[in-house]
Amino acid sequence: MFTVGLTGGIGSGKSTVADHFAAHGVPVIDTDVIARELTAPEGNALAAIRAAFGHSVMRADGALDRAALRRRVFADVSVRRQLEAILHPRIRHSVERVRAVLTAPYVLIVIPLLVETGDYQDLLDRVLVVDCPEDLQIARVKARSGLTDDEVKTIMGAQASRAERLAAADDVIVNTASPESLGAEVAALHQRYLALADALAP
């Protein structure tokens, strides 16, 4: 199946763009959603996370303390790598399982760490990057999450640079204009992807 990987920095608007594609009937597989499911109280990654990081990242009710884990992950690269080793293979397995049963012309996979991990290149026909200036990223993340400037910059510092993402892109949406303009860009790309998928169909 023709497969588009959607990526972008934190606060760039990946979810908004994905929602626009979904409105055109495109199936969307969001690796962030899968990660939340895997780390939910019944998720199959939670026991491994608890075993690796201890009760300091768990709440009293047995759920994951996401804020505590985030602080540890962004304070220590080795901790982040350890968490990624637990989550990424499980996420990839879920992505492949869902993708295998789809029958649409093409699928969109939202992969925030696409450039950082390099794990999905064998699955993807196109890479779509959602881009915006870094000051706008920071403002958006602060508005939705309540994080401080420094906390947002720490997260951004752990991600690929804007230049690295753009270098990996086949297509770019600059998400700084009106919602109407964004919708029009997505509609045009949707038609392009339908044509590309049709051209590759057996």
Image (cartoon, rainbow, N blue to C red):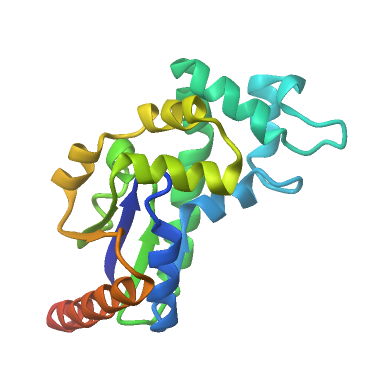
Expressed as whole percent of the image width and height from the top left, the position of residue 176 reads: 30, 58
Expressed as whole percent of the image width and height from the top left, the position of residue 26 reads: 39, 78
Name the quarter where the C terminus is drawn: bottom left
Residue under the image location 36 percent in, 27 percent down: 157
Asked which quadrant contains residue 118, the reply is top left
Residue farthest toward the right in the current orientation of the protein = 61
Disc tally is 0
Expressed as whole percent of the image width and height from the top left, the position of residue 94 reads: 50, 56
Residue under the image location 47 percent in, 53 percent down: 31
User: Where 114 sits versus 182, above or below?
Assistant: above
Residue under the image location 44 percent in, 81 percent down: 23
User: Where 149 sits versus 125, above or below?
Assistant: above
> Would residue 119 appear left or right of 76 to someone viewing this image?
left
> Would residue 40 appear left or right of 184 to someone viewing this image?
right
Question: Relative to the observer, which residue lies in front, 173 or 98?
Answer: 173
User: Where 99 sits versus 138, above or below?
Assistant: below
Name the quarter where the N terminus is drawn: bottom left
User: Where 44 sits versus 28, above or below?
Assistant: above
Asked which quadrant contains residue 102, the reply is bottom left
Q: Is residue 67 visible?
A: yes
Q: Is residue 27 visible?
A: no
> Would residue 43 appear left or right of 193 to someone viewing this image?
right
Residue under the image location 71 percent in, 26 percent down: 57
Question: Relative to the observer, which residue lies in front, 150 or 6?
Answer: 150
Expressed as whole percent of the image width and height from the top left, the position of residue 158 reads: 38, 28
